Amino acid sequence: MFLLNEGEVKVFRVLIKHVEEKKGSRNVYSNVVFTDGEAEMAANIWVSATEFPYEGKVVDLTLTMKNGYINIKGAVIAPDGDPAEYVRHAPIDPDQGMNMIYRCISGMNNPDLKSITEYLIRQNEPDFRKWTAAKSVHHNYLNGLLYHICRIIANIKTLSSVYALNYDLLMSAAILHDIGKLRELQMDNLGNAEYTIEGNLYGHLYLGAVMIREACSACGIDENSKTIQLLIHMILSHHGKMEYGAVKTPATREAYVLHILDDLDSKLWIYEDTMKNTEPGTFSQPNRWLDGAVVYNTDANLNMH
Protein backbone atom coordinates (compact mmCIF):
# COMPACT_ATOMS: atom_id res chain seq x y z
CA MET A 1 0.00 0.00 0.00
CA PHE A 2 1.18 3.51 -0.78
CA LEU A 3 -0.23 5.82 1.87
CA LEU A 4 1.05 9.39 2.05
CA ASN A 5 -0.23 12.60 3.55
CA GLU A 6 0.19 16.04 2.06
CA GLY A 7 3.82 17.17 2.25
CA GLU A 8 5.13 13.75 3.31
CA VAL A 9 8.13 12.02 1.77
CA LYS A 10 8.32 8.22 2.12
CA VAL A 11 10.42 5.38 0.73
CA PHE A 12 8.77 2.19 -0.50
CA ARG A 13 10.39 -1.01 -1.77
CA VAL A 14 8.68 -1.80 -5.06
CA LEU A 15 8.95 -3.57 -8.38
CA ILE A 16 9.02 -1.17 -11.33
CA LYS A 17 6.60 -2.72 -13.81
CA HIS A 18 6.66 -0.20 -16.63
CA VAL A 19 8.27 3.10 -17.56
CA GLU A 20 6.80 5.22 -20.35
CA GLU A 21 8.34 8.47 -21.53
CA LYS A 22 5.91 11.30 -22.25
CA LYS A 23 6.12 14.91 -23.37
CA GLY A 24 4.61 17.67 -21.31
CA SER A 25 3.99 21.23 -22.43
CA ARG A 26 7.56 22.14 -21.46
CA ASN A 27 9.54 19.09 -20.42
CA VAL A 28 9.88 15.37 -20.97
CA TYR A 29 8.79 13.18 -18.06
CA SER A 30 8.27 9.49 -17.33
CA ASN A 31 5.13 7.78 -16.12
CA VAL A 32 6.13 4.88 -13.87
CA VAL A 33 3.93 1.94 -12.86
CA PHE A 34 5.09 0.13 -9.72
CA THR A 35 3.82 -2.41 -7.20
CA ASP A 36 4.68 -3.71 -3.75
CA GLY A 37 2.95 -7.00 -4.56
CA GLU A 38 -0.34 -5.94 -2.98
CA ALA A 39 -1.18 -2.52 -4.39
CA GLU A 40 -0.20 -0.85 -7.64
CA MET A 41 0.26 2.80 -8.49
CA ALA A 42 1.44 5.04 -11.31
CA ALA A 43 3.33 8.27 -10.68
CA ASN A 44 5.49 10.68 -12.64
CA ILE A 45 9.13 11.64 -12.41
CA TRP A 46 10.49 14.59 -14.33
CA VAL A 47 13.26 12.76 -16.19
CA SER A 48 13.43 10.84 -19.47
CA ALA A 49 12.94 7.06 -19.54
CA THR A 50 16.66 6.56 -20.20
CA GLU A 51 17.38 8.43 -16.96
CA PHE A 52 15.11 6.04 -15.06
CA PRO A 53 16.44 2.61 -16.18
CA TYR A 54 14.68 0.50 -13.56
CA GLU A 55 11.91 -1.35 -15.43
CA GLY A 56 11.72 -4.94 -14.18
CA LYS A 57 13.89 -4.16 -11.14
CA VAL A 58 13.21 -3.89 -7.41
CA VAL A 59 14.06 -0.44 -6.06
CA ASP A 60 13.64 1.72 -2.99
CA LEU A 61 11.36 4.38 -4.44
CA THR A 62 11.03 7.81 -2.84
CA LEU A 63 7.55 9.30 -3.17
CA THR A 64 6.17 12.65 -2.14
CA MET A 65 2.69 14.16 -2.09
CA LYS A 66 2.12 17.74 -3.13
CA ASN A 67 -1.25 19.37 -3.77
CA GLY A 68 -2.90 15.98 -3.44
CA TYR A 69 -0.78 14.30 -6.13
CA ILE A 70 2.00 11.76 -5.65
CA ASN A 71 5.25 12.15 -7.58
CA ILE A 72 8.57 10.30 -7.61
CA LYS A 73 11.65 12.00 -6.20
CA GLY A 74 14.14 9.23 -6.90
CA ALA A 75 14.97 5.54 -6.83
CA VAL A 76 17.83 3.33 -5.66
CA ILE A 77 18.32 -0.29 -6.73
CA ALA A 78 17.62 -2.80 -3.94
CA PRO A 79 20.52 -5.25 -4.37
CA ASP A 80 18.73 -8.08 -2.57
CA GLY A 81 15.37 -7.49 -4.26
CA ASP A 82 13.85 -10.46 -6.10
CA PRO A 83 11.29 -9.30 -8.70
CA ALA A 84 9.35 -12.58 -8.37
CA GLU A 85 8.48 -11.68 -4.77
CA TYR A 86 6.81 -8.43 -5.86
CA VAL A 87 4.79 -9.60 -8.87
CA ARG A 88 1.13 -8.88 -8.24
CA HIS A 89 -1.38 -11.73 -8.42
CA ALA A 90 -5.15 -11.88 -8.04
CA PRO A 91 -6.24 -13.22 -4.63
CA ILE A 92 -7.32 -16.58 -6.02
CA ASP A 93 -5.80 -20.05 -6.12
CA PRO A 94 -5.69 -20.86 -9.87
CA ASP A 95 -6.41 -24.55 -9.28
CA GLN A 96 -9.47 -23.75 -7.18
CA GLY A 97 -10.64 -21.20 -9.71
CA MET A 98 -10.35 -23.66 -12.60
CA ASN A 99 -12.14 -26.33 -10.55
CA MET A 100 -15.00 -23.89 -9.97
CA ILE A 101 -15.28 -23.23 -13.69
CA TYR A 102 -15.21 -26.92 -14.62
CA ARG A 103 -17.89 -27.66 -12.03
CA CYS A 104 -20.09 -24.99 -13.60
CA ILE A 105 -19.52 -26.46 -17.05
CA SER A 106 -20.30 -29.94 -15.76
CA GLY A 107 -23.60 -28.67 -14.39
CA MET A 108 -24.83 -27.44 -17.79
CA ASN A 109 -27.65 -29.36 -19.45
CA ASN A 110 -27.46 -27.90 -22.96
CA PRO A 111 -25.02 -30.18 -24.85
CA ASP A 112 -23.93 -27.55 -27.39
CA LEU A 113 -23.14 -24.87 -24.81
CA LYS A 114 -21.45 -27.42 -22.58
CA SER A 115 -19.26 -28.72 -25.43
CA ILE A 116 -18.22 -25.30 -26.72
CA THR A 117 -17.46 -23.90 -23.28
CA GLU A 118 -15.43 -26.91 -22.20
CA TYR A 119 -13.57 -27.04 -25.53
CA LEU A 120 -12.48 -23.40 -25.37
CA ILE A 121 -11.43 -23.56 -21.73
CA ARG A 122 -9.45 -26.79 -22.13
CA GLN A 123 -7.78 -25.57 -25.33
CA ASN A 124 -6.72 -22.32 -23.68
CA GLU A 125 -6.31 -23.34 -20.03
CA PRO A 126 -2.57 -22.53 -19.60
CA ASP A 127 -3.18 -18.91 -20.60
CA PHE A 128 -6.73 -18.68 -19.21
CA ARG A 129 -5.60 -19.45 -15.66
CA LYS A 130 -2.80 -16.85 -15.61
CA TRP A 131 -3.91 -14.05 -17.97
CA THR A 132 -4.53 -10.48 -16.90
CA ALA A 133 -8.08 -9.21 -17.43
CA ALA A 134 -6.94 -5.92 -18.94
CA LYS A 135 -3.99 -3.71 -19.81
CA SER A 136 -5.26 -1.27 -17.20
CA VAL A 137 -8.49 -0.26 -15.43
CA HIS A 138 -9.52 -3.53 -13.70
CA HIS A 139 -8.03 -6.90 -12.64
CA ASN A 140 -4.82 -5.98 -14.47
CA TYR A 141 -2.51 -8.51 -12.84
CA LEU A 142 -1.62 -12.19 -13.06
CA ASN A 143 -4.66 -14.49 -12.71
CA GLY A 144 -6.87 -11.39 -13.04
CA LEU A 145 -9.04 -12.82 -15.83
CA LEU A 146 -9.75 -16.00 -13.87
CA TYR A 147 -10.57 -14.02 -10.72
CA HIS A 148 -12.92 -11.70 -12.63
CA ILE A 149 -14.82 -14.59 -14.18
CA CYS A 150 -15.09 -16.56 -10.94
CA ARG A 151 -16.64 -13.55 -9.17
CA ILE A 152 -19.18 -13.16 -11.98
CA ILE A 153 -20.25 -16.82 -12.05
CA ALA A 154 -20.62 -16.80 -8.26
CA ASN A 155 -23.22 -14.04 -8.70
CA ILE A 156 -24.98 -15.93 -11.50
CA LYS A 157 -25.76 -18.80 -9.19
CA THR A 158 -27.67 -16.44 -6.91
CA LEU A 159 -29.40 -14.43 -9.64
CA SER A 160 -30.59 -17.55 -11.45
CA SER A 161 -32.39 -18.67 -8.31
CA VAL A 162 -34.31 -15.36 -8.18
CA TYR A 163 -35.02 -14.64 -11.86
CA ALA A 164 -36.23 -17.04 -14.56
CA LEU A 165 -33.07 -16.87 -16.66
CA ASN A 166 -31.53 -19.34 -19.11
CA TYR A 167 -28.88 -20.62 -16.70
CA ASP A 168 -26.80 -22.55 -19.24
CA LEU A 169 -26.69 -19.65 -21.70
CA LEU A 170 -25.80 -17.13 -19.00
CA MET A 171 -23.16 -19.37 -17.45
CA SER A 172 -21.54 -20.20 -20.78
CA ALA A 173 -21.42 -16.53 -21.80
CA ALA A 174 -20.04 -15.49 -18.41
CA ILE A 175 -17.21 -18.01 -18.64
CA LEU A 176 -16.41 -17.09 -22.25
CA HIS A 177 -17.25 -13.36 -22.39
CA ASP A 178 -13.58 -12.30 -22.18
CA ILE A 179 -12.02 -15.33 -23.91
CA GLY A 180 -11.03 -12.99 -26.75
CA LYS A 181 -8.59 -11.24 -24.40
CA LEU A 182 -6.26 -14.20 -24.84
CA ARG A 183 -5.78 -12.96 -28.40
CA GLU A 184 -6.31 -9.26 -27.74
CA LEU A 185 -3.48 -9.02 -25.19
CA GLN A 186 0.05 -10.31 -24.84
CA MET A 187 1.44 -10.48 -21.32
CA ASP A 188 4.91 -10.67 -19.81
CA ASN A 189 6.01 -12.38 -16.60
CA LEU A 190 5.38 -9.21 -14.56
CA GLY A 191 1.73 -9.11 -15.60
CA ASN A 192 2.23 -6.18 -17.99
CA ALA A 193 -0.08 -6.37 -20.98
CA GLU A 194 0.10 -4.83 -24.42
CA TYR A 195 -2.33 -5.04 -27.30
CA THR A 196 -1.58 -7.47 -30.11
CA ILE A 197 -2.14 -6.51 -33.74
CA GLU A 198 -5.43 -8.44 -33.61
CA GLY A 199 -6.32 -6.69 -30.39
CA ASN A 200 -5.78 -3.25 -31.84
CA LEU A 201 -7.61 -4.05 -35.06
CA TYR A 202 -10.61 -5.98 -33.74
CA GLY A 203 -10.90 -5.99 -29.93
CA HIS A 204 -11.76 -8.87 -27.64
CA LEU A 205 -15.53 -8.89 -28.26
CA TYR A 206 -15.09 -9.65 -31.95
CA LEU A 207 -12.20 -12.04 -31.28
CA GLY A 208 -14.32 -13.91 -28.72
CA ALA A 209 -17.11 -14.34 -31.27
CA VAL A 210 -14.56 -15.69 -33.76
CA MET A 211 -13.28 -18.19 -31.19
CA ILE A 212 -16.82 -19.43 -30.53
CA ARG A 213 -17.35 -20.01 -34.25
CA GLU A 214 -14.04 -21.88 -34.39
CA ALA A 215 -15.15 -24.02 -31.45
CA CYS A 216 -18.43 -24.81 -33.21
CA SER A 217 -16.48 -26.05 -36.23
CA ALA A 218 -14.14 -28.14 -34.07
CA CYS A 219 -17.03 -29.66 -32.07
CA GLY A 220 -19.34 -30.25 -35.03
CA ILE A 221 -21.98 -27.80 -33.77
CA ASP A 222 -24.18 -25.64 -36.01
CA GLU A 223 -22.99 -22.07 -35.48
CA ASN A 224 -26.23 -20.78 -36.98
CA SER A 225 -28.43 -22.42 -34.36
CA LYS A 226 -30.52 -20.10 -32.19
CA THR A 227 -28.57 -21.03 -29.05
CA ILE A 228 -25.18 -20.23 -30.57
CA GLN A 229 -26.47 -17.00 -32.08
CA LEU A 230 -27.69 -15.91 -28.64
CA LEU A 231 -24.33 -16.83 -27.11
CA ILE A 232 -22.43 -14.80 -29.72
CA HIS A 233 -24.81 -11.87 -29.18
CA MET A 234 -23.96 -11.91 -25.48
CA ILE A 235 -20.23 -11.81 -26.23
CA LEU A 236 -20.68 -8.91 -28.65
CA SER A 237 -22.98 -6.90 -26.35
CA HIS A 238 -21.46 -7.35 -22.90
CA HIS A 239 -20.00 -3.83 -22.82
CA GLY A 240 -23.58 -2.58 -22.78
CA LYS A 241 -23.35 0.47 -25.02
CA MET A 242 -21.75 0.95 -28.40
CA GLU A 243 -19.85 4.00 -27.15
CA TYR A 244 -18.22 1.65 -24.61
CA GLY A 245 -17.15 -0.82 -27.28
CA ALA A 246 -20.22 -3.05 -27.58
CA VAL A 247 -20.99 -4.22 -31.11
CA LYS A 248 -24.69 -4.31 -30.22
CA THR A 249 -26.66 -3.35 -27.12
CA PRO A 250 -28.06 -6.24 -25.05
CA ALA A 251 -31.25 -7.59 -26.66
CA THR A 252 -32.05 -10.35 -24.16
CA ARG A 253 -32.39 -10.51 -20.39
CA GLU A 254 -29.36 -12.80 -20.18
CA ALA A 255 -27.24 -10.40 -22.25
CA TYR A 256 -28.29 -7.52 -20.02
CA VAL A 257 -27.50 -9.47 -16.83
CA LEU A 258 -24.05 -10.37 -18.17
CA HIS A 259 -23.35 -6.73 -18.96
CA ILE A 260 -24.48 -5.61 -15.49
CA LEU A 261 -22.42 -8.28 -13.70
CA ASP A 262 -19.34 -7.56 -15.81
CA ASP A 263 -19.62 -3.84 -15.11
CA LEU A 264 -20.41 -4.44 -11.43
CA ASP A 265 -17.34 -6.59 -10.84
CA SER A 266 -15.09 -4.22 -12.78
CA LYS A 267 -16.31 -1.16 -10.86
CA LEU A 268 -16.14 -2.85 -7.44
CA TRP A 269 -12.58 -3.95 -8.20
CA ILE A 270 -11.67 -0.31 -8.94
CA TYR A 271 -13.20 0.76 -5.63
CA GLU A 272 -11.30 -2.00 -3.80
CA ASP A 273 -8.01 -1.20 -5.51
CA THR A 274 -8.36 2.53 -4.86
CA MET A 275 -9.06 1.90 -1.17
CA LYS A 276 -5.70 0.13 -0.87
CA ASN A 277 -3.91 3.41 -1.58
CA THR A 278 -6.24 5.55 0.54
CA GLU A 279 -5.93 6.09 4.29
CA PRO A 280 -8.87 4.63 6.28
CA GLY A 281 -11.46 7.30 6.95
CA THR A 282 -10.27 9.52 4.09
CA PHE A 283 -11.16 10.10 0.44
CA SER A 284 -9.12 9.29 -2.65
CA GLN A 285 -8.41 11.66 -5.49
CA PRO A 286 -11.13 11.73 -8.20
CA ASN A 287 -11.00 8.49 -10.19
CA ARG A 288 -11.49 8.81 -13.93
CA TRP A 289 -12.62 5.16 -14.22
CA LEU A 290 -15.48 5.97 -11.82
CA ASP A 291 -16.58 9.07 -13.74
CA GLY A 292 -14.55 11.30 -11.45
CA ALA A 293 -15.98 9.95 -8.19
CA VAL A 294 -13.87 10.04 -5.05
CA VAL A 295 -13.58 6.81 -3.05
CA TYR A 296 -14.05 6.76 0.72
CA ASN A 297 -12.01 4.11 2.51
CA THR A 298 -14.39 2.51 5.00
CA ASP A 299 -11.51 0.34 6.32
CA ALA A 300 -13.32 -2.81 5.13
CA ASN A 301 -11.52 -6.15 4.95
CA LEU A 302 -10.83 -6.44 1.22
CA ASN A 303 -9.51 -10.00 1.56
CA MET A 304 -12.76 -11.50 2.79
CA HIS A 305 -13.59 -13.10 -0.57
Image: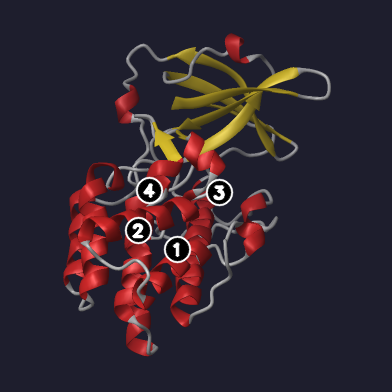
Residues tagged 2 and 1 counted as in contact (Cβ below 8 A)? yes
- Disc 3 residue type? Glu
Q: Does residue 12 appear in the picture of this structure?
A: no
CA–CA distance between discs 2 and 1? 9 Å
Of the pair 51 and 129, the residue shown nearer to us: 129
Provide residue 182's location: percent of width, then percent of height: 37, 44
Q: Quadrant of the C terminus?
A: bottom left
Q: Earlier in the sequence, mark 4 or mark 2?
A: 4
Residues tagged 2 and 3 counted as in contact (Cβ below 8 A)? no
Note whether 199 is above or below 55 in the view shown.
below
Q: Nearer the viewer, mark 1 or mark 3?
A: 1
Q: Which of marks 2 and 3 is in front?
A: 2
Q: In this view, does 225 lie to the left or right of 220?
A: right
Q: Is label 4 in a helix, a strand or a loop? A: helix
Residue at the far right: name it: 26
Q: Residue at horizontal 38%, vertical 85%?
A: 165
Q: Say the numbered circle drawn on residue 279.
A: 3
Residue wearing tag 2: 212
Q: Is residue 30 left or right of residue 190?
A: right
- Disc 2 residue type? Ile
CA–CA distance between discs 4 and 1? 19 Å
For the residue carrying disc 2, how many other residues have a C-alpha within 10 Å: few (<14), some (14-19), or many (20+)? many
Which quadrant of the structure image shows residue 243? bottom right
Q: Is label 1 in a helix, a strand or a loop? A: helix
For the residue carrying disc 3, how many other residues have a C-alpha within 10 Å: few (<14), some (14-19), or many (20+)? some
Q: Is label 2 in a helix, a strand or a loop? A: helix
Q: Earlier in the sequence, mark 2 or mark 1?
A: 2
Residue wearing tag 1: 235
- Disc 4 residue type? Gly
Provide residue 289's location: percent of width, then percent of height: 62, 53
